[in-house]
Amino acid sequence: MKRSIGKILSGVILSSLILFCCGLAAMADNPKTSAEDMNPPILTHFELKRTNVEAPGRIAVVGDATDEISGISRFSASFCNMETGKCISVDLEKEYWAIVRDKYGEHNQKFAYTDGKFHGYIDIDQYIPSGEYCIDLITVGDKAGNTQDLYGPGFRLYKEYLIDFPDDILPDQYKDLKITVTNTNGTEDVTPPTLTQFELSGTSMEAPGEIDIVADTTDDISGATRITVSFRNKVADKTLNTFLNKDDTATGQNSNGRNRYDTAYNDGKFHGNIYFDRYTPSGEYYIDHIHVVDNAGNSQLLIGLGSKDYDWKQEYHPDYILPDQYKDLKITVTNTNGTEDVTPPTFTEIELGRTSINTPARIEVIGDATDDISGIDHFSVRFRNKETGNCIGAYLSDKDPEGFNGIDGEFIYVTLYEDGKFHGYIYVYENTPSGDYYMESILLKDEADNDQTWYGFGAEDYDLYLKNEPKKLLPDKYSNLKIRVTNTGIRLNTTDPALDDNETESDIYFDHWVEKGDTLWGIAKKYRTTVDDLMTLNPNIKDRSLIYVGDLIKYKYGERD
């Protein structure tokens, strides 16, 4: 089976893009007449190997589903106890890891299950309470981003869904599935921890700087595992968060000082600090909330005066309010550096390299924005097909990935684009449905975490209410931008980005994205191959004298320098 080394090298970057784009199509394994994929997988099998278990223990689960084109990428299930609200879940996979020993030594290797189905285990830990856990949800998703959620009686809104969304209910043969758990160890834990101490090392400071925090809790059985804390400036609407831990990583390190081993603080309490950077605005930061969680997953969220919901919670849910000695806590911050930043970036420009594209290919995107103080940290753009709901998008950066000019230890130096703007690519893959993809949104965030989103004609709620909120809309020249995608149904010789053990480098393919000035003859010469070989590997090329900027061309590794 042929593999794409380009997919291997760009996996980290492209995985972020795939997560960002709703329904973004990915590559599939089995060729079809058309590569468009707009339908979710269909559940065909779900089986529990047993339905009774003593805690702690585990239950083997086998499932299967069919998908017309791109193949299954996600298969999960959950069961819930309606009395306690506790849930247990499983992720199913078609492959598993095992340790093998060969001439290279001992290492992990991935193997496919022989029956071709999806397998997994529901782990029942020592803290899970006894009771019946009814099927809550089975989710199956494909590589094109299509997902189907099927609900059972363990879902808290099951009765409402039976009436309003009958197509989202599990088939009869699965909806009555349940697991009976018996826990006789005396370790059942359904009670969240209780906050018993919360102290600040100071209540005023000059930015930049930090204030240490010490906290403690009691828990009946499993023990508290983490505490999160949030303070909020109600005037600037600025929120700062931190985590408190019981382990002191500053002292828990070995002799060479590199590999750290966690050691518990001597007092057995939770420690941390909240940092106010040079962009933090002056003002009073009131306690927003404290969230405590134990090892059994029980949690308690307690809010203070800094919370937007304080008045409402105090009236209707007073048990959610922090005790009196904590709810009024505040930190007064003074910033005299002239670097306070409470204003989000301003969008100024977006430009597409082209507005019509045949799959698979990519489109260059160039954008620009301004920020008053801290500078741009995040710039992303997304287009949406209003008929199918699929999206395509890109992250833009002002740093040129081709501009590496040296490596010094762990630091890689990159150069900025000469035009001072932000550049990126929208990748359109083989399963992306044909159609018009309209501008959905542009998101900007600065180094001080101020962010702003502008919406276009492709936004899901545009017709409902966004078109009547001009401050949230892009200017017309950008709001109406669209990309016309034509799915050619052509599949290139590339599949999974992982090599099998019996494959060699001669079986790998590289990606070349066509740039301005490229010719097929020039690409063949650059990679020491032939035009005929490129035509064979790339059936989407019909005319050897005609290629387009942004087209994806495969070439064979064995012919390259």
Image: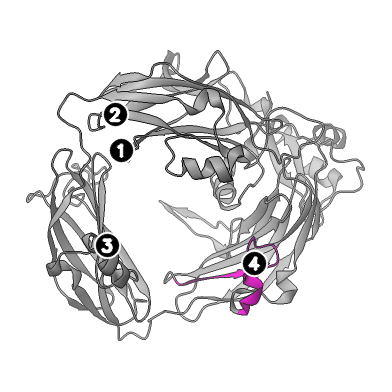
| Real-space CA distance between mark 4 and mark 2, rounded to the nearest whole angstrom | 44 Å
**In the image, residue 389 lies at what x, y percent?**
67, 51
| Dot 3: element | loop
| Residue at 25% over, 66% down | 274
Give the residue number, with chain letter if any, for mark 1.
Answer: 83
Instruction: Name the side, left or right, on which 271 lies relative to 76.
Output: left
Of the numbered discs 3 and 1, the one sitting upstream in the chain is 1
| Real-space CA distance between mark 3 and mark 1, rounded to the nearest whole angstrom | 21 Å
- Dot 2, crowdedness within 10 Å: few (<14), some or many (≥20)? some
Q: Which residues are magenta?
A: 450-470
Instruction: Name the side, left or right, on which 534 lies relative to 145.
Output: right
Give the residue number, with chain letter if any, for mark 3.
Answer: 317
- Dot 3, crowdedness within 10 Å: few (<14), some or many (≥20)? few
Of the numbered discs 4 and 2, the one sitting upstream in the chain is 2
Give the residue number, with chain letter if any, for mark 2.
Answer: 131
Q: Quadrant of residue 149?
A: top right
Of the numbered discs 1 and 4, the one sitting upstream in the chain is 1
> Is residue 380 visible to the viewer in this orientation of the structure?
yes
| Tag 2: amino acid | Gly
